[in-house]
Image: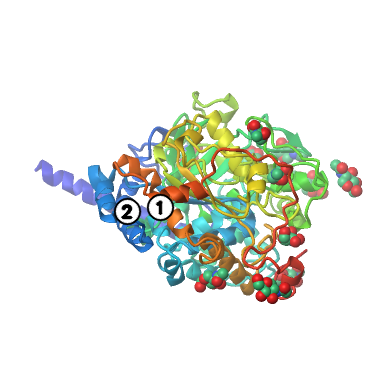
Amino acid sequence: MLLLYSALIIVWACKTGTYAKTSVSKALSSSYAPVYVECPSEFQWLRPAIGLNPKEANWVAGRKSVVVDALSTYLRQLELEDFAVSEYITAIKENDYAHVPIMGYSISGGGWASAFTGIGGMRALDSRLDAANEQKTGGLLQCLTYMAGISGGSWPIMSIALNDFPTVDELVQSWHVDINRENATTDTKYAASPTTLFEELATKAKAGFNVSIADYLGRALAYEFIPGANGGLAATFTDVASQSKFQSHDMPFPIIHMVEIDEDDVEYFGLQLPSSNSKIYDMTAFEFGAWQGIGLFSPMEYLGTAMDNGSPINESACVRGFDRASFIIGSAEDAFNAWTIQTDSNGTLAGFAKRSHRAAGSQMLSTSEPSMSKRASPPTAALQGIVEAFNETFGLNISSITYAIYPNPFAGISSVTPPSAQKPLLRLVDGSETGQADPLWGQIQPARGSNFIITWDDNEDQIPYNWNNGTNVYDTYLAAKAASIPFPIIPTSNTFNSRGYNVRPVFFGCDPVLTTTKSADSPIVLYFGNAPYSAYTNYSYAQAATSPSQLSDILVNSFNQITQGNGTLAADWPICLGCAAIDRSLPRVGMQRTAQCEACMAKYCWDGTEDNATAQIVDPSLLLQPNLTFAEWIKTHDFQED
Ligand SMILES: *[C@@H]1O[C@H](CO)[C@@H](O)[C@H](O)[C@H]1NC(C)=O
Ligand SMILES: *[C@@H]1O[C@H](CO)[C@@H](O)[C@H](O)[C@H]1NC(C)=O
Ligand SMILES: *[C@@H]1O[C@H](CO)[C@@H](O)[C@H](O)[C@H]1NC(C)=O
Ligand SMILES: *[C@@H]1O[C@H](CO)[C@@H](O)[C@H](O)[C@H]1NC(C)=O
Ligand SMILES: *[C@@H]1O[C@H](CO)[C@@H](O)[C@H](O)[C@H]1NC(C)=O
Ligand SMILES: *[C@@H]1O[C@H](CO)[C@@H](O)[C@H](O)[C@H]1NC(C)=O
Ligand SMILES: *[C@@H]1O[C@H](CO)[C@@H](O)[C@H](O)[C@H]1NC(C)=O
Ligand SMILES: *[C@@H]1O[C@H](CO)[C@@H](O)[C@H](O)[C@H]1NC(C)=O
Ligand SMILES: *[C@@H]1O[C@H](CO)[C@@H](O)[C@H](O)[C@H]1NC(C)=O
Ligand SMILES: *[C@@H]1O[C@H](CO)[C@@H](O)[C@H](O)[C@H]1NC(C)=O
Ligand SMILES: *[C@@H]1O[C@H](CO)[C@@H](O)[C@H](O)[C@H]1NC(C)=O
């Protein structure tokens, strides 16, 4: 009797659950407004940032069995010398897959530049692309557990996840990159006019939520990156978890970062900039929170719910659909504070592409370098009218609309410091603004146990020609050191430039001694700074329309970078990539680096010596065609210069 009764309750519970779900998703597909629902009872609203979220832990466990098979195929394809693939595979499977290496990929901030060059890098690692398998780089993508994005780098990460992990060639077809994302005047299937975007925002405002530039950017970008009717109107970050390839553990797990503006952060022209030790929010399909600073996570699904001291303020007013994928990528990209300050100061403050390395804890400050490259001008002009439109439509001024506004799940919790952080609303901005434009912070948390991370850096910090010099990874090293998080020691940008790490691949942290904790707990980090191999890919991060032919040049360039020109620049490279990928797992299963891999590490690992030679202007020519200058090349290739 008792059994029957509990079975009935379960059936009933499932039914209500399904009913609620259908009506919520219906509501979300008809309007951008989040919806209010009855709060679930017996719900865990907060969890301390200790270990993984149980749902993530469970997912990662499932991913490991898929990775093992992918790794077996990938390693066999490499034909490593004196390496017993089957012995290794058997060994990493032991103790419930305990030693399967955790690997990841990250795409830096850098607008449409990092979005396209970064996804090009993933393409070259995909076993579904024959050319990648021919070069023996194909298949590593299938071995990754995590993928992370910041700012422009968050767009392809969210896009590939919500499109159910298609190939990159399929994915970029859906983006319609040639449509100018800043000046659509009429509505089409692939772009919406500002009027329509404001109408979408108005539904959210009417429902009682703050709206900002982040919503506007997000809705505009969604027509490019988020699948589904009306510019992916309905899609939420939570929806990633219901993608079939997510459920079958056939895609890496996406992570997106943003940072918080605190009350006492520095202010210029009425707008604030985050300090370099600002709280870094870690967002996944399962949860929202911060490992350091807050030390708590809250479920992504109910993000937007007004909370106090760990419970909803009104049990009948829980919120669903605040975590719109569009809003997440728009918030991730929202650097309107930095763009405005940079413009208002005539480029002397908040140089968005000019972050200099500095001690952790200091503010992101100006550099006095005058030669701000034209390519790196912020898109403020394009957004000027937006400020007026927010004034006219919503009666809001610039300081109210600059930051992405999130109801604070950690409001009123006395353990959160400083007390100002217990406020009801969070103001979030582009994670690049702290000087850590490479989204490594989430992957290097000890709970995630990363062993190998590929960092695609295209935040264009090397002025004046928009190349990259490693400064942002150096900043992560400083922050990791300050927080005692295992991470490779990273040299300064002088060393990147003088050693050529700005144009060719390098591994950091191979020798555990060269890490913040002098231990093998640190991942090995592979750094790729976007560089010209077969095409000049230093176009502006703010370039809002890209021709198909330029996109093709970009994808081929990234392919050439990942494969080192199909081996023409370094025939040993694909082998060495594989050696580094599994290196951390070898001692754990009692195996040793082979002589072949030893030679690889000697060649591609940073040996710990700085080379602080005076910085030269970084003005590389094509690595695969050194005699083809930019001036010559541009005559026959698409490249917008102003
Ligand atoms: C909008 O963008 C397209 C494509 O880049 C360009 O041809 C057109 O001139 C732009 N229109 C306006 C009004 O800026
Ligand atoms: C709680 O939320 C419900 C549903 O939105 C609303 O009708 C009610 O007025 C709210 N109660 C309070 C005290 O705000
Ligand atoms: C920026 O340049 C404009 C035009 O030259 C000038 O009016 C303005 O005062 C400058 N602003 C700052 C902060 O230097
Ligand atoms: C690297 O880029 C940063 C940020 O733009 C800059 O401050 C620094 O001077 C650059 N380093 C070198 C060696 O040019
Ligand atoms: C903008 O609006 C907010 C909220 O109404 C107000 O507190 C603030 O003083 C205003 N800022 C300016 C610069 O007018
Ligand atoms: C909106 O613009 C008008 C005209 O410039 C100005 O008087 C008003 O203060 C602005 N409102 C806000 C909220 O900034
Ligand atoms: C957010 O909305 C609330 C309620 O309408 C308002 O009081 C507050 O000023 C808004 N905050 C910002 C930063 O716009
Ligand atoms: C390498 O192979 C790719 C894919 O076939 C091709 O697009 C690219 O041009 C090749 N690069 C070189 C340097 O041959
Ligand atoms: C190079 O510069 C870094 C950072 O300023 C410093 O820590 C290091 O000691 C320098 N190395 C040499 C060899 O001068
Ligand atoms: C792109 O890079 C090349 C090589 O450094 C340089 O000649 C060219 O001026 C750069 N273009 C832009 C827009 O920065
Ligand atoms: C560039 O170099 C290649 C060989 O590396 C040569 O075949 C070609 O003729 C050269 N082109 C020019 C314009 O000098």
Task: Identify whether 354 is placed above or below 627.
Answer: above
Q: Which circle's residue, 2 or 1, is located before the other in the chain?
A: 2
Q: Secondary structure at mark 1?
A: helix
Q: Is residue 458 visible?
A: yes
Cβ atoms at labels 2 and 1 below 8 Å apart: yes
Q: Secondary structure at mark 2?
A: loop
Percent across and percent down for residue 38 are 40, 44
Percent across and percent down for residue 127 are 40, 65
Amino acid on which the number 1 mark rests in the picture: Gln
Along the line of sight, the residue nearer the viewer: 351 or 493: 493
- Identified at 79% across, 48% down, the residue is 343
Q: Which residue is mark 2?
A: 83
Task: Identify whether 72 is placed above or below 522.
Answer: below
Work out which residue is located at the far left of the displayed protein and give it.
1
Which quadrant does the N terminus fall into?
A: top left
Q: Is residue 200 visible?
A: no
Percent across and percent down for residue 282 are 50, 42
Give the colour scheme of this rendering: rainbow
Total numbered labels: 2
Q: Ligand 8 closer than 8 Å to the CB at disc 2?
A: no
- Identified at 74% across, 42% down, the residue is 614
Is 559 displayed left or right of 8 in the figure?
A: right
Which quadrant does the C terminus fall into?
A: bottom right
Amino acid on which the number 2 mark rests in the picture: Phe
CA distance for labels 2 and 1: 9 Å
